[in-house]
Structures are given as C-alpha cells and as structure tokens.
C-alpha cells in the first residue's frame, strides 16, 4: 500500500488524475497522521471532514470525467493567518480566539478552486510576529528535527510559518501555505529542510489574510520540493481587484517551464552577506551552493549590496509601524476578544482588551511602531527607514546589471532550541538578517535545503530573483535540489 | 470688501478666519468599499466587511469619488495633483472601526485654488474678494455613536463609516462673519453646480471647522482656535462673532488665547472648549501601505474637465448678456437648481426676460407661500412654458395668467386646458370692446371731460373699467388703442 505521507503535491495530483488511488484515501491517511502528531502542536484547528469533503468532490469530478484543477486531491495545511469561512481564524492570538470569518481569503479560495482540501489551520507566531513560533497564544510548535547529540531538546521550527514548516517536515501534509513579511516562509523552510518561496510582492492577494505589515506581507507555498512549490504557487497567485496592491498580470506556467539548466545565468554572491563571524557550517553550505550552481551552467559573479547592514534596522521600523496601525482594529468593539471591566469606559475597554488579547511580542512591536510614528520621531525613524528601503531596492537594481539571481544563506544558523533566544529580542530579530532585504525590495526569494550542519540540522540556501522572475528563482532552486542530494528526514519521535 | 472691526477697550481688532469645509462627495458607494451611501437607512444596514474593518479586509479606491474631487478642484481653478497619496490618521474611537481614518495629509489630490465672493451677491456693485483655497483632500467619514438607545451602553451605527468626504481648506483670507458666510454660500453653490456634493447641511453633507484668531489691524497673527463641526451658515457666522469677541475680551483682560478645539452651542450661541493643544491627539500619520499612490492620466483629467458644467460666475455673465438685470442674473445663478429651471424654460422657447420675471415674481412667490423648494414645485418648466406661451402669443393677458397659474398649482391641470375650460381666452373682438367703451364713457361723462381737459392719469381708470367689463379677457393692447381713439 502506498504511504501517502511520502507523496508530494505533484505525486498526489498525478496519482489521483491517473486513477492510481483515490483522493479520499490520501485525505484519510493524512488526517490520521495529523491526529497522531499532537506533540508537534502544528495545528490550532484540525478539519479532517473538510479534507475528506474536498477529496470526495475531486474523486466525483474525476469519475464524471470533468477536468481537474492544479491541486486536485492534494490535502494541505492552511496557516491560521488566512481567513477561512466557517472555520476559526486566530492569527494564533487570544484576541481572535473563537473568531469565525464569514468570508474566505482569496488565496485559500484559489486553492480550494484548484481542488486542494484543508487538513486544518496551522499554528504560527502570533500575528506572524516571530522567528521561532514561540509567540503563539496556542503554544509553541515543535520542530520534528532533533540534534544528533542524542538529546531531545525541543527545537524551533522557525517562524512565523512554524506550523507549516513543522507539519510538512513531519509529513503531516505535502504542502502548506505560508506568509512572509521578513522571512516567515524562508527561515522556517530552512530550519526544517523543506522548500518555500515568497513570490514578488503583489503576486498573491492579501485579501482575507490577517495583516501584519501591509507593504511587506506576501503569501507563498511551502512544500518538500521545488516542483511542488511551483505547482502550488500557480494555484495561489493571480490578480485580485479586492487588493489594490495586487499585480494585474497573468500567472505564468511555472511548473511547465521548470528547467535546471542555468547556462547563461549569472549568479551574484553579495559580499556584504558574508558577515564577520558567520557560522562555519553556513559558510560551507553557501560555498557548496555556489559550486552546484556553477555545475548547472551558471556563471558566478561577486556583487555588492552596500546598504545591506541597514536593512534589518529599517525593517524593524517599517514593519512595526505598519503593524501598530494594522492591529488598531482589534479594539473589542465589533469582533474578537472584549474585556470590559465592571464600570469601565471606552478607553478602559481598549486598554483591558488589548492587554489581554495581545501577547508580549505583539505588544512590543505595537509599542515600537507607535513610537517611530510619533510626532517628533517620525522623520528620524520612519522617514529614514523608508529612505533606506529605497536604497536597498536600488542596491538590487544595480546588482541586476551584473547578475540575474543572487545566492545567499537563508538564515545565519540552523534551528535553535526553543527558549534559547527568548530573553533577547535583538538576537531573535537577527535571524531575519538575510531574509529582510528581499522583503523590503518586494523581490521573489526562495529557500531550498542546502545540507545539514554539525548537529545534523538542516540549513537553507536562499535564491533572490528579479521582480516577477519567479521562474529563474525556481529553476535555480531546482538545480540546487538536483545536486545537493538532500534526503535527510526528521526521525518520527512523536 | 467691508472692514469688519471689533471695538475693544484698547482699540480696534481685526478678525482672521480660515475654514475647513467637509463636504460629502456625491457617489453611489463609499470611498473604499461597495456599500451604499444612502442617507437615513436602518442602522448598520450599509456596512461591508471593509467598512467594519474585519480582519484581512482591504480598501479599494472608488474612482468616482476621486473624479468628483478633481472636478471640484477644476471648478475653483485649483492645481490638480497628478500624483497623490492616501495616509492613515491613527486614533482610537468606537466610531472608527479601522482605528485609523484614511485621509490625505502629505500629498492631497487638489492643491491651491481660489473662490471669488461678493458680500452682497445681489448687488452688482458690491465689491468682490478672492479667498484662497489651500487644498482639497479626500478622506473617509466615521460612523456614528448613539448614546440614547440604552441606559448604560452606547451603540455604533457604521452606515456613514467610509463614506467619502472632501475636505476643502481655505487660506486665512476671510476677515468677517459676512465674508465667511458669503464664502460658504459660494462654495456650496459651486459644489452643487459641479454635482460633487449635495450641500445639504441639515443632513450633515456639509459642515465646517472654523479657525478664528484676532489681531490689531495689520499686526502679527494671533493664536487661533478651531471650532468644530458647525453645520449651518448662520451658526458659523454666529460662532465667528462670538469667538472673535471672546478672544478680544480675553486678551484685553490680560489673558491669552490658547490653541484649542472648541464646540459651538447653537442654543447658547457660544463656543466652548473641547480639548486643548496639550490633549491633542498624536495622529501618527503615515502613508497607507494598503493603497498605491493615485496617479491621474491625461484622459482622466480631460474627461473631468469636459464634464464640468457652466459655473455660476460664467452663467451670470451670460444671463446679463441675455438682457436680464444684474440682480435677476445673480438670483437665478446663486443655486444650480434655479439656473437649470430657468434654462429649461428657455429651452421650451420662453423669452429670457419673460422667463426671469415670471420665475422671480410668480413662481418664487407661489413656492414661498406653499413653503416648498424649487425641487418640490407642483409645476414643472414644461408646464410653465405652456402658460407663458399663452401670454406671449396674446391668448391670455398677464393678469389672467396669474389666475391660471393658481389653478395649475391647485389642480395640476395644464394651462391650455384651464383657459379652455374656464373660457379665459383673451378677446381681440374690437366690436365688443368698443361697445363696452361706449357704455363706460356714457356712464362717466364727467371723467371723460376731465381727461379731455388734460387729466391724463384718468386713462388708467378707463383701461381698468374696460378690462373689468370684459372680465379681464380683453387684449390690453387693443383696449389701449381703442380707448385712445375713443377718448380722443
């Protein structure tokens, strides 16, 4: 009997289409795996009946000879930042605990239209703020990975899409949605040895996605290989008139055009990313990546992205600034948590509701964002950060004169242990150092597995491409995937 | 323009006034959502997911609202900014679901323009003054709190939440309550001509924030106060009068004006402090990251310009050229509806002077008596033109026309039908008229003698008697001619 947990998106889609197995069999098998993996805490809500219903519809369509969608029969996990009609949507917050939208996000609706089914809503960092999935109101997500030291320290699955990364790496689902504001798809993918792509800003509609930082938020797929990412991105992307920042462009046939022959492609290696004290294993993986791309026919060029060191500070001004405003709507008036102490007035209700509804990290970022937008500080922080953002974008523009893609590590290290970085928010923020420049510039960027570190933990290689050139990013990802020989898996301890 | 001065103990004071007028843009749907903007609906019946700021909802600009703002800008000869942007104004209030109002602080869609006002628009010799407009920007309205629905709770109605407003900001060029009134009237007229706002102050479609300061004539500008949400022209003038006097009294008694927000109480006819500068919100404005900048192309601007109607000043000049008095031209153009009524009469073939005289005396008088507005007139321009046509072609006299008009107002019948039914047709039968004249002269031989001995004024008596005898239905011109002949 087929072990459906070992099949990826393409394999399930093709198997269902060819009649090798029924979509319902896949859904049921994965429902069972999800139910048995509570120790990972990857899901906030499980929706086995929805996975089965979607699969039955696909099986019925196939039986009736109807054309099947791009994701027909593929059960996926849905990051709990996407509003799902009739299913609780929390952004992993107490604020939205019990909130059941009457509407479906554009991206999730696109996936259901393509024939995917929902296994459940995946845990994440609260309001997508975090790099380790330790800020969720519903508890930490545990990575399925363990260090090779024989210990069983619980490791971070990365964040904010930590439920997504953990579930895919544990083979609870072949793929899941993620969102990436400053690395929230790429860093968790790197931490658990899977692939994930943040497309060009505007490719995927933000409508119905709980907002963190509007000018940066972008949805994307996470899966176990590059092809699966290409398939799922095709299903997710597309112009949406309900999102003013959505790109009015046709969705390319990324999967069909996958090609790992990189002849004629120039790969830029940004010298500013080679930080002092860079992790030895990360540096070595990066060198391997360079060698693999060269082997695939690419030319390697040194490039400079001179404003890189300002990217992280700028990001941690812009993202909290937008968040402080985006999260103002959680006020206890219309939906979600309301904490109304006896005899309280409106201001008291706001204070009590927001103190109770938001976790520490969310409150921290609201405070930072409020501060940097305040009269007297706005120019020094927000305006300055916007200038830096423009310079970062120009760095990339200049780089494209000499290269077509950029290769860098996804994160400065492999996964860390849960609790190891909690005490110091700055060291936690540093995890995003390689990820945020592409976010600030709105460029497509992908993480693919690059190997294991000394502790036996996965590390990710990041490919950054020109705006709208997801194809080149995916192709380079495929070239690495074919050469890295990455087959490591987490042992099934849960 | 007139010099408005407040006489204080220390001498004369000058008043400096600037107005920020919030005008609701006429549009079917809200600024960033598809919800209806209809007035007077059940609470919370015109609320979309976007208006209620549900998680993940995004604003999409309504092109029509931007178009109306641009047309308004063009109507006041303002600079139209081809590139503008929306900003968020952040503050918490229960009537503001997003926790911020989407507005335009840094890059408004319309820049500098001006409006010319006259203190007495009906007096052609009244001096004029140009009031500078600093900007027009587009923003969302908030919802409404209802405090009288429950003993301990306030209710929120979000029907207005997200409705598009234009904020029209004047320069501090206004120097008297009368000028402020003239400015607001003129602005309202322009908005109604353009069709970008219905100007209905009672329903809150237009309201003004009034900035007032005082200074010694020509001196340094004083500290200003802002009186919020004044919703009638009269109240605004009263608020300015009160506030300027209050400031003068305060300064002269050794105090100082504090920069603050005030409210006008129309019952007490006074302003009072709402919050001081220290309590002022820090709105933390920043560009709305959910929205792209607004870029206007040539075709869009072209269409906006082409769709502008003839504006009051141009219309007034044209009416004067048609032979109307300056006074009539001013009255007929003050409101778009009046001008359109008048032009409808012209389109039906009525002579301009006849149309203007009839409108100004007969129609306005009748509506006044009925307590109705022009929009509610029981007689429409086509029906009126029929009546005036009967006068013009001599079918009925002017005095009969008055009678016919009254019947029209009462019954809604057409003029020709009434004339026919009541037998009011004017007679041109010279024989019948001559017979009546003969009888009248015979009965009044003393007056005939007086007339013939030079008392010309008695001619009117004979005209009246003849018309009376003819039951008003004789052609007055013919009566005149025949009387002159008979009296010699």
Image (tube, coloured by chain):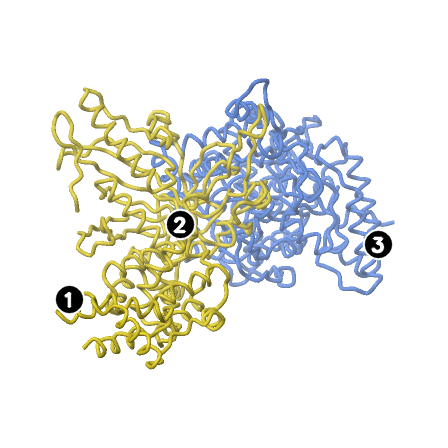
Chain colours: A blue, B yellow
Q: Is residue B269 left or right of residue A474?
A: left
Disc 2 or 1, which lies upstream in sequence? 2
Foreground disc of the pair 1, 3 = 1
Disc 1/disc 3 C-alpha distance (Å): 118 Å
Q: Which residue is mark 2?
A: B199
Looking at the image, which residue sits at the far top?
A342
* Label 1 in the same subunit as label 3: no
Task: Tell me the subunit letter for badge 2.
Answer: B
Q: Quadrant of residue B468?
A: bottom left
Q: Secondary structure at mark 3?
A: loop
**Do marks 3 and 2 both belong to one polypeptide chain?**
no
The span from disc 3 to disc 2 (Cα, nearest Å) is: 65 Å
Q: Chain of mark 3?
A: A
Query: In this view, which residue lies farthest toward the right?
Result: A1
Q: Nearer the viewer, residue B441 or A433?
A: B441
Looking at the image, which is closer to me, A431 or B100?
A: B100
| Element assignment for label 2 | loop
Q: Which residue is mark 1?
A: B455
Few, some or many residues within 10 Å of mark 2 (<14, 14–19, 20+): many
> Where residue A125 sits in the image (x, y, percent)?
60, 34
Image location of residue A112, percent across then percent down: 71, 52
Give the number of the disc on residue A22.
3
Q: Nearer the viewer, mark 2 or mark 1?
A: 1
> Would you say residue A303 is visible in this rendering?
no
In the image shown, does A258 or A393 lie closer to the viewer? A393
| CA distance separating discs 2 and 1 | 57 Å
């Amino acid at each position: 009997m087929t072990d459906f947990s070992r099949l990826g998106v393409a394999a399930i889609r093709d198997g269902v289409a060819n009649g090798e197995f029924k979509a319902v069999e896949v859904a049921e098998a994965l429902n069972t795996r999800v139910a048995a993996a509570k120790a990972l805490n990857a899901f906030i809500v499980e929706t086995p009946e929805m996975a089965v219903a979607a699969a039955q519809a696909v099986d019925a369509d196939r039986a009736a000879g109807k054309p099947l969608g791009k994701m027909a029969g593929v059960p996926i996990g849905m990051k709990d930042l996407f509003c799902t009609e009739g299913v609780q949507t929390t952004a992993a917050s107490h604020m939205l605990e019990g909130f059941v939208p009457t509407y479906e996000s554009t991206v999730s609706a696109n996936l259901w239209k393509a024939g995917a089914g929902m296994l459940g809503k995946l845990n994440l960092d609260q309001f997508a703020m975090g790099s380790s999935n330790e800020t969720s109101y519903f508890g930490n997500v545990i990575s399925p990975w363990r260090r090779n030291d024989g210990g069983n320290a619980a490791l971070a699955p990365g964040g904010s899409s930590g439920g997504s990364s953990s579930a895919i790496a544990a083979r609870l689902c072949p793929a899941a949605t993620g969102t990436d504001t400053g690395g929230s798809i790429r860093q968790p993918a790197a931490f658990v040895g899977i692939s994930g792509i943040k497309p060009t800003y505007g490719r995927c509609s933000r409508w119905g996605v709980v907002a963190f930082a509007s000018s940066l938020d972008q949805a994307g797929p996470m899966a176990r290989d590059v092809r699966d990412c290409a398939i799922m991105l095709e299903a997710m992307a597309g112009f949406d008139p309900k999102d003013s920042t959505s790109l009015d462009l046709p969705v390319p046939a990324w999967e069909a055009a996958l090609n790992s022959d990189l002849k004629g492609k120039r790969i830029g290696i940004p010298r500013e990313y080679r930080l002092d004290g860079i992790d030895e294993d990360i540096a070595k993986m990066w060198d391997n990546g360079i060698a693999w791309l060269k082997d695939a026919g690419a030319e390697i060029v040194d490039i400079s992205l001179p404003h890189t060191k300002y990217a992280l500070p700028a990001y941690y001004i812009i993202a909290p600034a937008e968040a402080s405003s985006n999260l103002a709507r959680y006020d206890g008036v219309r939906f979600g948590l309301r904490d109304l102490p006896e005899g309280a007035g409106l201001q008291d209700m706001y204070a009590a509701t927001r103190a109770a509804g938001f976790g520490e990290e969310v409150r921290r970022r609201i405070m930072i964002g409020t501060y940097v937008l305040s009269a007297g500080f706005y120019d020094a922080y927000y305006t300055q950060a916007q200038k830096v953002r423009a310079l970062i974008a120009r760095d990339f523009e200049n780089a494209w004169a000499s290269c077509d893609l950029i290769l860098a590590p996804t994160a400065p290290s492999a996964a860390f242990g849960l609790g190891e970085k909690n005490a110091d928010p700055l060291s936690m923020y540093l995890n995003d150092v390689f990820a945020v420049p592409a976010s600030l510039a709105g460029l497509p960027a992908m993480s693919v597995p690059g190997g294991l570190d000394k502790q036996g933990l996965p590390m990710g290689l990041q490919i950054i491409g020109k705006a709208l050139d997801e194809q080149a990013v995916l192709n380079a990802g495929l070239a690495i995937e074919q050469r890295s020989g990455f087959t490591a898996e987490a042992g099934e301890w849960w | 323009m007139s010099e408005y001065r407040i006489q204080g103990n220390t001498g004369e004071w000058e008043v400096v006034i600037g107005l920020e007028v919030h005008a609701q843009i006429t549009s079917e749907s809200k600024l960033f959502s598809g919800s209806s903007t209809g007035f007077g609906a059940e609470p919370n019946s015109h609320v979309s997911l976007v208006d209620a700021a549900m998680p993940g909802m995004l604003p999409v600009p309504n092109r029509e609202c931007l178009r109306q703002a641009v047309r308004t800008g063009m109507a006041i000869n303002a600079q139209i900014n081809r590139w503008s942007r929306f900003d968020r104004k952040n503050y918490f209030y229960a009537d503001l679901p997003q926790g911020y109002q989407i507005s335009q602080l840094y890059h408004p869609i319309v820049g500098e323009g001006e409006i010319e006002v006259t203190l007495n628009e009906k007096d052609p010799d009244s001096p004029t003054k140009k009031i500078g407009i600093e900007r027009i920007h587009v923003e969302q309205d908030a919802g409404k709190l209802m405090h009288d629905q429950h003993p301990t709770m306030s209710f929120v109605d979000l029907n207005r939440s997200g409705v598009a407003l234009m904020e029209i900001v004047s320069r501090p060029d206004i120097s008297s309550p009368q000028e402020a009134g003239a400015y607001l009237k003129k602005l309202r007229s322009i908005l109604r001509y353009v069709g970008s706002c219905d100007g209905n102050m009672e329903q809150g479609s237009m309201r003004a924030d009034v900035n007032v300061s005082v200074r010694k004539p020509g001196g340094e500008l004083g500290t200003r106060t802002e009186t919020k949400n004044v919703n009638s022209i009269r109240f605004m003038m009263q608020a300015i009068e009160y506030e300027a006097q209050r400031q003068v009294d305060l300064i002269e008694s050794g105090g100082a004006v504090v920069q603050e927000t005030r409210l006008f109480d129309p019952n007490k006819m006074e302003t009072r402090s709402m919050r001081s500068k220290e309590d002022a919100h820090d709105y933390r404005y920043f560009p709305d990251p959910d929205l792209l900048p607004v870029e206007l192309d040539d075709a869009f601007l072209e269409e906006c310009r082409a769709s502008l109607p003839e504006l009051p000043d141009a219309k007034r000049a044209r009416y004067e050229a048609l032979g109307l008095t300056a006074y009539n031209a001013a009255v007929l153009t003050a409101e778009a509806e009046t001008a359109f009524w008048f032009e409808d009469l012209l389109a039906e073939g009525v002579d301009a002077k006849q149309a203007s005289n009839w409108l100004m005396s007969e129609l306005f008088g009748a509506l006044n008596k009925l307590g109705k507005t022009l929009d509610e007139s029981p007689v429409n321009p086509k029906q009126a033109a029929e009546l005036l046509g009967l006068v013009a072609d001599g079918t009925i006299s002017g005095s009969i026309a008055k009678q016919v008009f009254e019947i029209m107002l009462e019954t809604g019948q057409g003029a020709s039908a009434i004339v026919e039914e009541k037998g009011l047709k004017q007679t041109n039968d010279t024989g019948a008229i001559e017979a009546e004249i003969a009888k009248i002269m015979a009965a009044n031989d003393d007056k005939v003698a007086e007339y013939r001995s030079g008392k010309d004024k008695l001619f009117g008596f004979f005209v009246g008697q003849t018309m009376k005898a003819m039951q008003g239905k004789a052609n007055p011109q013919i009566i005149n001619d025949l009387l002159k002949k008979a009296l010699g």
